[in-house]
């Protein structure tokens, strides 16, 4: 009997202890008061209805608040308030709505002062109940790692019916105090207003409720790199973390679509892959506070690499459990991008802006550059997890269908461009330059499969057949250094100036043979060019337009010289004999001109134009 009474008392004591104490934090024997206050139940559920202040919170009117001192050991101050928010569409929300929300602010670092009506954004946590029904919907948590009263990291956790589903994590690596843009206690307002400038890391993880652990998912990570110390980013890498069993025929863009806070965790999410890497660079080195987001080129890489990387477990003792997130280490990510085992590669080069689409408009609408870098396209050569928005006009595309583990580039004299080694085909849609009209398209191909382009086709808008086709014997290939600093220096100090100078000489030589006025829109685009690479691109379009017009004029001249098909024996017809020799010489020079022009030997082309001009004078005299 005595033993039964003792046993009963022990059981009663255990039950009372369980109900009197906060929930245990998985993996933590002694939880700090602030994490114990927000500790989740097993399975990742966080409900507010059991809090001693909940009834008071229900009675609050919009704009009212009260403060509560935590009764846990070492407990600090918290604040509860009611707000009215207009919640916009997105992240699983089907339509905008206005709702009363309960916000619980926990003062993690103990710097609440009497009379404070809000927390801060260095070490405090904001727990949000959108419908004021007791089920937590969001948690925005700021982490001050070095104690300087400035947040170094932040979490934005998304709950559905009180169950933790997914989170964004942000890391301020350059210590400039800028992290995510938060609107209505979730990521909002556009990442232009966050911090894609300098050294920064953002990534998503999915919550595994059975293991109480974070799993890489969606955009994991986005990483920005300030390579020259000017406070701006010169490189950006984005990796898509997707279940390795995904089907690209039915799941074209899961890297984006998997960030849905209403989606429960599934078994397939325990076998994740880095299935897409997008890697963009500022080649000409113009990224600066005056020219932010100045990315010139980008690689789009797809494969099925398991998401297992040394050092990917990232632990922070100030993070509410689970403390360990998983992401490719920032310091290793560029190496991952440059050695990724790609099944296919897309290479894009931004030649000029596109008036037909808005890429966001910030921070400088006149340049309209995107914070994520350079995207691939959803047409012609479709690659899963490409993302968007897409620039279609004046963006050069090149496609490598074969496996590769290195990102190798070469320079081609034929078109004065940097290309992707091994690409078999490519194109650039030309237009929306100074107006809203299409100019046409230039296509390029590797016809002999030696890894370099050797055929170019010029297609003018509205014309069924190409206006010019050239397959060259010597495209003037030059291998390029793999070091980005060396390549950038070579590009800006040699390749670009040489190409601009060559264009100028050829344009001047063509002007000697005819009046070819520059269309108003192209003159406007040339004047508006913000850098030498844009200037070169518009020059190229002007040069090609004028060359086609000149070629047509010269063909007409040649046709007149060959008119009548005189008899073979011209021994007694000196004038006709002279015309025949002149006509054939003209034809030979035209063939040489086409070859020199196609191979990018513009100095030779200018010389040949001079000779053709003299032949033209002689032909006029003969006529």
Image (spheres, rainbow, N blue to C red):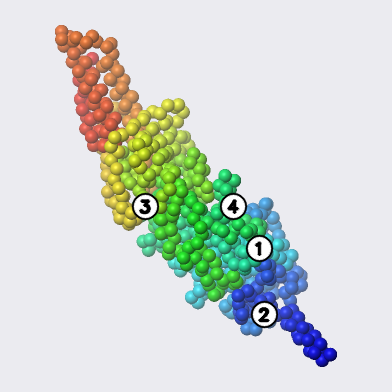
In the current view of this chain or complex, which residue is farthest to the right?
1
Q: Is residue 268 above or below residue 453?
A: below
- Lateral position of residue 385 relative to residue 44, left or right: left
Residue 520, position as x, y percentages in the image:
40, 35
- Lateral position of residue 58 relative to residue 558, left or right: right
Label 2: few (<14), some (14–19) or many (≥20) C-alpha neighbours in 10 Å:
some
Q: Is residue 194 in view from this perspective?
A: no
The quadrant the N terminus occupies is bottom right
Q: Which residue is mark 4?
A: 257
- The tag earlier along the polypeptide, 3 or 4, is 4
Q: Secondary structure at mark 1?
A: strand
- The tag earlier along the polypeptide, 1 or 4, is 1
Q: Which residue is mark 1?
A: 159
Q: Residue at x 64, y 81 (%)?
A: 75
Q: Residue at x 37, y 63 (%)?
A: 229
Mark-to-mark CA distance, 1 and 4 = 17 Å
The disc at residue 34 is none
Q: Is residue 372 above or below residue 81?
A: above
The disc at residue 283 is 3
Mark-to-mark CA distance, 1 and 3 = 41 Å
Residue 271, position as x, y percentages in the image:
56, 58
The disc at residue 70 is 2
């Amino acid at each position: 009997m005595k033993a039964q009474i003792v046993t009963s008392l022990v059981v009663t004591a255990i039950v009372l202890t369980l109900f009197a104490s906060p929930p245990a934090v998985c993996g933590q024997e002694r939880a700090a008061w602030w994490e114990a206050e927000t500790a989740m139940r097993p399975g990742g559920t966080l409900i507010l209805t059991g809090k001693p202040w909940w009834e008071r919170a229900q009675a609050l009117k919009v704009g009212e608040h009260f403060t509560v001192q935590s009764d846990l050991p070492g407990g600090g101050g918290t604040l509860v308030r009611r707000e009215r928010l207009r919640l916009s569409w997105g992240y699983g929300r089907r339509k905008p709505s206005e709702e009363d929300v309960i916000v619980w602010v926990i003062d993690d670092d103990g710097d609440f002062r009497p009379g404070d009506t809000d927390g801060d954004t260095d070490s405090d946590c904001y727990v949000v109940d959108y419908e004021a029904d007791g089920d937590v919907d969001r948690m925005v948590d700021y982490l001050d790692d070095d104690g300087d009263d400035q947040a170094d990291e932040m979490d934005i956790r998304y709950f559905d019916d009180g169950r933790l589903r997914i989170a964004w994590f942000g890391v301020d690596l350059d210590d400039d105090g800028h992290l995510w843009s938060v609107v209505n206690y979730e990521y909002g307002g556009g990442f232009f207003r966050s911090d894609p400038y300098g050294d920064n890391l953002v990534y998503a993880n999915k919550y595994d409720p059975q293991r109480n652990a974070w799993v890489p998912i969606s955009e994991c990570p986005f990483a920005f790199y300030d390579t020259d110390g000017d406070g701006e980013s010169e490189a950006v890498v984005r990796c898509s973390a997707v279940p390795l069993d995904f089907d690209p025929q039915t799941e074209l863009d899961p890297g984006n679509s998997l960030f849905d806070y209403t989606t429960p965790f599934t078994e397939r999410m325990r076998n994740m892959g880095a299935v897409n890497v997008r890697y963009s660079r500022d080649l000409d080195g113009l990224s600066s506070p005056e020219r932010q987001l100045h990315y010139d080129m980008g690689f789009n890489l797809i494969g099925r690499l398991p998401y297992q990387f040394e050092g990917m477990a990232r632990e922070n003792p100030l993070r509410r459990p689970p403390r360990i997130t998983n992401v490719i280490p920032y310091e290793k990510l560029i190496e991952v991008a440059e050695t990724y085992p790609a099944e296919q590669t897309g290479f894009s080069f931004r030649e000029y802006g596109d008036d037909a689409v808005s890429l966001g408009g910030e921070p400088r609408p006149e340049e309209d550059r995107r914070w994520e870098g350079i995207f691939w396209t959803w047409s012609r050569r479709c690659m899963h997890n490409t993302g968007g928005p897409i620039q279609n006009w004046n963006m050069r595309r090149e496609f490598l269908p074969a496996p590769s583990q290195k990102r190798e580039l070469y320079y081609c004299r034929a078109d004065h461009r940097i290309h992707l080694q091994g690409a078999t085909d490519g194109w650039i849609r030309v237009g929306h330059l100074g107006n809203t009209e299409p100019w046409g398209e230039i296509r390029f191909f590797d016809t002999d499969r030696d890894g370099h382009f050797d055929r170019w086709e010029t297609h003018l808008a509205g014309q069924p057949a190409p206006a010019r086709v050239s397959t060259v014997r010597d495209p003037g290939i030059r291998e390029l250094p793999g070091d980005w600093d060396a390549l950038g220096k070579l590009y800006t100090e040699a390749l670009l100036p040489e190409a601009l100078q060559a264009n100028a000489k050829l344009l001047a030589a063509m002007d000697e043979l005819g009046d070819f006025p520059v269309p108003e829109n192209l003159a406007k685009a040339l004047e508006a060019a913000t850098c030498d690479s844009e200037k070169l691109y518009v020059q190229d379009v002007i040069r090609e337009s004028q060359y086609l017009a000149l070629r047509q004029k010269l063909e007409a001249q040649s046709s007149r010289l060959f008119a009548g098909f005189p008899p073979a024996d011209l021994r007694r017809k000196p004038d006709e004999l002279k015309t025949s020799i002149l006509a054939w010489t003209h034809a030979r020079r035209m063939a040489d001109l086409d070859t020199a022009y196609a191979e990018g030997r513009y100095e030779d082309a200018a010389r040949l134009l001079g000779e053709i001009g003299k032949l033209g004078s002689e032909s006029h005299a003969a006529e």
